[in-house]
Structures are given as structure tokens and as C-alpha cells.
Image (cartoon, coloured by chain):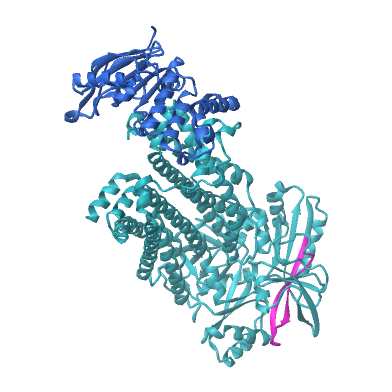
Chain colours: A blue, B cyan
Amino acid sequence: MKKMMIGDRIVKSFGEGHEKRNVLGGVSIEINEGEFVAVMGPSGSGKSTLMFALSGTDSIDSGKVVVDGKDLSAIGENELSDLRRTTMGFVFQQPTMLSNLNILDNIILPAMRDNRRNVAKISEKARSLMQRVGIAELEKRDITQVSGGQLQRAGICRALMNSPRIIFGDEPTGALNSQSAQEIMDILSEINADGTAVMLVTHDAKVAARTERIMFMRDGTIVSELKLPKYEGMDMDGRIEVVTEKMREIGI
Amino acid sequence: MYYRIIRNDMLKSKVITLATIIFVSAAAMLVSLAAILVVNLSGALDMLMTQAKTPHFMQMHSGEVNTARLASFAEQNRNVDEFQVVEFLNIDGAKIILGDRSLTNSVQDNGFSIQNEKFDFLLDLDGNIIHVSDGELYVPISYMQDHTAKIGDKAFVSGKEFTVAGFLRDSQMNSALASSKRFLLSTHDYAEIKNLGSTEYLIEFRLKDMSALGTFETAYASAGLEANGPTITYPLLKMINALSDGIMIAVILLVSVLIVAIAWMCIRFTLLAKIEEDYREIGVMKAIGLRVSDMKHIYLAKYAAIAAVGSVIGYALSLMFKGMLLENIRLYMGDSEHSSLASLFGLIGILLIFLAMMTYVNGVLRRFRTLSAAEAIRSGTSSETSAGTKRFRLSGNRWFNTNVFLGIKDVLSRKKLYATMLVVLVISSFIMIVPQNLYNTISSKGFIQYMGIGTYDMRMDVQQTDHISAKTSEIVNSMKNDSAISKYVVLTTKTFKVKTENGSEENIKIELGDHSVFPIYYSKGRAPAAETEIALSALNAEELGKKVGERISLATEGTEKTLTVSGIYSDITNGGKTAKAIFADNTADMMWSVICAELSDQSLVDQKASEYKNRFAFAKVSDIDEFVAQTFGTTISSVKKASFASIVVALVITLLITLLFMKLLIAKDRYSIAVMKALGFTNSDIRTQYISRSVFVLIIGIVLGTLLANTLGELLAGAVISSFGASTFTFAIHPLSAYLLIPFMMIGSVLIATIIGLTGAGQIKISESMKG
């Protein structure tokens, strides 16, 4: 399988002098095209930092990140932004919407950056995405007028607008009730089934159990890896069991 | 505990605290300066007029004087304290040479006098009465100011040599607006040159009771005494003396009002931003049972500290700068007796500002009371309404670049926030445009229309000479044959008696001739068009209690003439009391005549003026620019200085406020910036968004500021101008500077400030701002 993202001995520290603390202590990771992966670990294990490093939203101290054959440390700030906009999509724990735009405008925002002349086409695509995640009727609402689950779906629509090759999700279900969480995971699985790679950062075994490969982190390093068969909508309890067993085994 | 909270808070927002202190200081300084100047000006003026014993009533007269008759009038009038007739020897400017320059080009009537014995003293620069020795000449102080003469210079008057021994303060003729200037020499020297010029007389009175001045004026007029010349009274002298510095004070006051407004905005903005920032904490404090007044105290203490520091700095600065601004007053009038009182008034002014600020902060903090603790904790932000922006959708946007759209959208959806910046920009463009327009207006040729002078190129005054009418026609004849002169008119001034309401008679000077050739500006009505019409100067109309359409009756050689008032105009010439009519009259004596001319080729003005000067030595020839420059020169140049200063001030304010605003905005918008960046917007995209915001606000600001400047500004400037004697006026706008240069400079400074302010945005890390 083709590798779309390679992280090689990534080191990242925060603070200075005595307070200096390595958050990533030489992490190496590879993600293939269309793969569905999860990074698990307790708070402070460095899983979010790893995600920010891989997506080029944060600089690293040493090591390198290669996306699509491009070394991120060798390209400029603007190219990084371009890469993020065209190849990556983000879904965060808190819905990160701009408060003065309505739902539809928030969704089309990243697409309008480059292609505003096609506003009709863009809006059409946004509407079909909204249809797909079940929020078609909300397009004119303000972001304060919808629920957390609906907002998260809108966030996924936004992440999909530029047809990215990978979607990063940082605890995408963390702020949702279990019903909504499950629906969001269904949507993400579907997206993955269409060929988009998905990388989730989570401490929730139920979320991780949906993926094909889980990397476990502790104190800034990947301590273990677990492979699962592709989820086909069956035996969820069994998969969760395997994940929690593994977690117990390595003590996280 | 308050101290610690306040200190931490200020350290956290150094730039903003500093900026607020700067504006409060500037406001305090200006208010204090204005107060100090007002007290000093009035004090110094009183002092000068007391030391010099300025006459309460003065009648200028050219022609014979019957001193005995005047003396007996003075004796019989119970209100007269002292009386004297002063000689004023008029000598043509060409015959007066100071150092190596002659006064040929002076529009002033330069004359020579000896020191008076009873009152109306000419003072030296220490305020002492000057005693002149033979061979010495004391020169009016305005010639020291414009560097025409210095002490020790040789001076020649009609060939007789003098030494400039010093400069003099003249409580009557100090001001450039007074059209005569007195030189002082010894009695012996005066007798020697007496025959070289024409003598005018100043008939002067000091009264026992100043409040009965009006009655005295009437008594003098109805006694039929010498009155061939302007009449000037104490209040008019006082006004003329105060005018130049008065305008400066008015400008300072105007600017200080605006700076106070900006300091206000600053406080409002930081306070609102702070409250929003602390919204959740305020809610929590309220929820755990802290009283509203406890929280208010913390905020109030902070702003009290800022306002106090600003006031102290402002006061200190005003004490430092007052010397500079008092220079002119000191030079022309000397020191004031109330200088310590002045500083006290400055302090009171500052105290008022301080109190007003505290009241304001207290008022803003009142919203604590209505803040719902539950909502504050739940949402963390006060919900800003964004009514009216719903239609402005990205999905409906075809015209704007997405970044520009986002910038404009943000402004529209947070109107309250941007209103602060808008107001500052409106004020800034206002204080740039108004003084600039004022300067353009008073320096434009058309402005003299407001002053009762038509827009001609050259004027020739024939006065203080015999056979005025013959000499005038001599000039007219040569103008008739001069192809360079496209049109001209002769205006002859004569004195008539006018019946007042109460039946007594007063002198009125009427300028007769065709007033349609070089029209002046009439604040009400129009120029006299028929023989039965008359136009009055604003001062005369007020004094006679006449409005347009009413009638007045003139006494001419036994017959009575009834005239209808056709218009009222502003005038500063001849003490402001003039009238214009077109009827023919052969009875009354001619006081003087003026021939006004327009040239077909305006570039020839200098040449023509000197040509006529040489041909008609008896007339005073001046081209109009020179006339204006010498009459309003100092005023125009100080308004020019003020207008440049206000441009600089406004640009600095724009720069500072925009910078401050951007810093606050970025601190507030960290989160949305991080979201944008995560979505793949570049730093330059974000810069474009913020620049669109400030440019959008700026454009509205400039439009509003310009509109305001042309309406309210015109009214305000009109108020300043009306102190000259003009009652209505419109701006002469220089379109290039008002509509291009000033907006361009503002856009420049806003862009610079925005870009500098945005440097912080580039450093916002997505990873740090998105957590939690």
C-alpha cells in the first residue's frame, strides 16, 4: 500500500531550561492511503501533539514529517497552509466554528478561499454533504442555534469540502452523548470507506475499536500497536474487548 | 488586595494602559493649557489697558480741531474724568526707513506721536511709560515681531535720522487688525517733522463710569463735535487686542474637546473588552456571592489610577509648555497679574476631566448589575447581536474576495465593537479636515468678501489729503485709458447723521458708489440696488436695531432721507461700523475714497501697483494679496500652523488607536484565527481579512468625518470666524487635499498600524489556541 504520511523520529518539547519537557521523544509513524487509524493514550501522552506535528500545524524540534513525498520542514508557511487546505481535513473535539457565519457559510469557508467564482457549485456540494450527515435543514441557522452533535456533523462537512486525502480527528466525539458519538463514528467510517484516510486521536476504546490500526502512546513514545480487521458493522463488542484487553496489557 | 489586582492587570495589558494614559495626559494638558491661556490673556490684557490707561472713547478726526469747544464739552459732561486731544502725524510709508527697509509696502497707517501726559500711554516691554530723548525712536512691537527693525538700527523719517531705541506696546494699536500704528519720538523731534506729513487728531476721553459709555457716545454725536473719522470704544479695543490669541485658545479648546472624546473612546473600548474578557469570572464572582459594588471597586480603582497618573502628567506638561504659548501674549501685553491663579484654573479644568471620567466608568460598570451569573458561566461570552447581517452570506458572495468578505462581515456583525474605532476615525478625519478647510478658507481670495472687502486685485486709498474728489478723478481718468484695467469702481465714504430709535442723532459713515462691481458677501439680504436702499454692517445693524426691510432716516443738509435696509454684511474695516449705499450726494464732506480695480491679467498686479504708486504719490496703493497678508497675515499663519499640527496629531491618533485596536482584536480573536489557520488559511489571508476590516471601517469613517467636517465643522469654524465680525460663511474647500490627500494619509497610517498590529497574529499557534 502507498504511504501517504511518514513521521520519522519526531522530537517535540515544551518549556525552557528546567521546565523543559519532551512531549514527543522520537516518535516514528506511517499512515497509508485510505487507512483508518487511531492513536490512543492517557492525557499528556503526546497524542494530540503528534497529530499537530503530522499535520504541520506545529513545528517540531527534530526528526521529519513527509506528506506526499514533501518534507514539511523544507516548505514554507504558505505552502504548509496550502497543503493543509487541499490535502487535510480537521475535526476537533469542540466544534471550531466562526460565530458570525451561519452553518452553510462555515462549511463552505475553506473551499471559498480558492474558488469563490464557483460559489454555486461549492454550495451544492456543501448541501449534499449536509444531506449525507443529516443536517440538510440547518444551513441557515446560526451556530448557537444547533446542538453539539449537529455542529460536529457540520464540522465534518467542512473538513470534507476540499475532498481531502486524510481527515484528522482530535477526540471528535469527546463532547457528545453516546448516541451522537456513534452516529459521528458511522459517518467517519463511511468517509473512510470512500477512500479517505482517517486518523483519530482518542482515549475512548469504543472510538478506537472502529479503526483498523491502533497505536498506543505513553510519555511521548508509541509503546504498542494493534491491528484489527476492517469494521463491517458487526461484532463491535468483541472489538472493544480486544482493545481494552490490549490497554490493560500495556497498562494505560 | 486592590493594589495587587490592579498592578497585575496593568502589567498584563501594558500597551493599552500606556495608550490610555497618553490620551488622558494629552486631554488634561490641553484643557489645562486652555484654562491657563484664558486667564493669562484676560489678565495681561487688563494689566496692559490699566497701565496704559487706555481711553474709553476715542474719535479720530482729520481736519481742523476746535480744542476749546471740545474742552468745554468735556467740562460740562459730568461723566468725563479726563480729556485730551492727541496728534497723530501721518507720514507715507515710503518716507519711513527702518534699518535698510522702507515701509512702502505697509498697509498700515504709520504715524508719529509724542508721549501723552494724562493717559493713553505708550509703554515699553516692561510695562513702564516710555520717556524719549531727542534722536530716539520707539517702534511698534509688530515691527519687531516681523523682523522689520531691531534695537540700535538707524531710522530715517523723511530724511531725518533717528536711532531705534526700543519697541513700544500700544494699548490701542498693538494688533495687526488695528489699521494704524504709532511711533514714538520726543517733543522736540516731533516739532521738526510736523510739517512733513498730515496731522490727524485723536480726541480721547476717560470716563468716570464706563457703563454709561453708550450715553456718552450719543452725547458726543449729538453735540455736533469733530467726527471726521472712525469712532473707537474701549470694548472694541479690548476685543481687537484679544483676537489673535483668542483664536489660538479656541483652536486649543476645540482640539482638547476632541482628544477628551478619544480618551473617552479608549477607556470605553478597553473597559468593554476587559469586561467581556472577564465575563465568566464576573459571573463566577457574582455566583459565589460577591457584591456588585465590590467588583465595581476593583475596576474603578484601576481607572482612577490611570486617570490620576494621566492628569498629573498632563498638568506637568501644560506647565512646561505654557511658556511657549504665552510668548505672544507676554510680548504684546506683558505679564498677567493672575499667573498663579491661572495654574489653579488649569488644575480645576483637569479635576473636572478626572471626575467626568470616573462618572463615566461608573456608568459603564452599571451593566454588572444586569449581568446574569448563570448565563455568564454557561456561555462565557455576552451574546452580541448581529441583526441585519444575516443577508450578507458567504454563500451569496460573488463579488468580494473571500478574505475581504470575511473582514467586512466581521465588522457588520460586531458593530458595537467597531463603533469605537469608527468614532475615533471620524474624529481624526474631522480634526484633519476642519482646520485645513479653515486655513484654505481664510487664505483664499474669496474670504475677504466676508470681511466687507470685495475681490478686486488692487486698491488705492485717497485720504488725509485735500481735494480728495479731484485727486480721485485724476486716478479714474488714467484708469479709463489703461487697457490693463478691466474694471474699476470708486467708493466714496462720507459721514451722515442717522436718527436712532430714541430720537437722538448718531454719526454713520456711508460708502457711496456702485457696490455691484466688486460684490461682498451679505449675511442677510443683498447689496443696495436702488437710491433708496442702504446696507448696514453687522455691528451698525445691531447698534441701530435694524433688520433687513426696515427703514432708517438720514439727516442730510436739513432734509431728511428715508432709506430701506437692503442687506447686512460683515465688516472689520473702520471699526466694523460702516454702511453702503448708492445714492448721489453733493452735500456732506468726503472723508476718503477708495478706487478698486481688477486687472485683465492678474500676473501684472505687482507691476501695475508700483506703476500707480509712482504716478499717484498721494494715494496709498496696495495689491489685495498684500493687503490681506498684512491684515490677516499673523492669523493666517497661525491657523496654518494649527492645521498642520492637527494633521500630525490626527495621524498619530489614528495610528495609535488602530494599533491598539488591532492588538485588542487579535487577543480577542485568537481562537478564530487558529481555526482559520487550521483550515488552511495562510498568514497573508488573515492579514487581508484584518486589513479589510480596518479599511472598511476607515472608509465609513472618512465619509462620515468629511460630511461632519463640512456641516458641523463649518458651523464651528463659522463661530471662530464670527469673532472677526463675520456672521455666516461657507468653507472654501481644496478638493485635492480634503478629498484625496487627507484620506490617503489616513489610509496610509491605518494600513501601517494594522500591519504592525497584526505581527502578533502570525505567532498564534493553532495547537495552543485550539486546546480545551
Q: With B579 as the anchor, is B176 left or right in this view?
A: left
Q: Residue drawn 64% across and 58% down?
A: B627
Taking the view exactly as shown, the residue that stands out farthest to the top is A1
Residue B367 part of the magenta-drawn span? no
Image vertical order of residue B140 relative to residue B689, above or below: below
The segment highlighted magenta reads B489-514
Q: Position of residue B211 (x, y in %)?
A: 54, 84
Give B575 or B749, whichever is nearer the viewer. B749
Q: Is residue A126 visible?
A: yes
* A85 displayed left or right of A220: right
- Number of on-image labels: 0
Q: Position of residue B359 (x, y in %)?
A: 39, 63
Q: Quadrant of the C terminus of chain B?
A: top left
Quadrant showing the N terminus of chain B: bottom left
Q: For residue B313, what is the image quadrant?
A: bottom left
* Residue furthest left in the image: A18
Q: Nearer the viewer, residue A19 or B253?
A: A19
Above-or-below relation of B266 to A208: below
B670 lies left or right of B486 = left
Q: Quadrant of residue A2?
A: top left
Q: Position of residue A130 (x, y in %)?
A: 51, 28
Compared with A179, B74 (above or below) is below
Instruction: Decide which of B393, B92 is in the foreground and name it.
Output: B393
Q: Residue at x 54, y 52 (%)?
A: B430
Check residue B498 for magenta coloring. Answer: yes
Q: Main secondary structure of the magenta part?
A: strand
Residue B100 seen in render:
no
Nearest the viewer among B216 and B20 is: B20
Residue B305 percent location from the top left of the image: 30, 57
Question: Which image quarter: residue B542?
Answer: bottom right
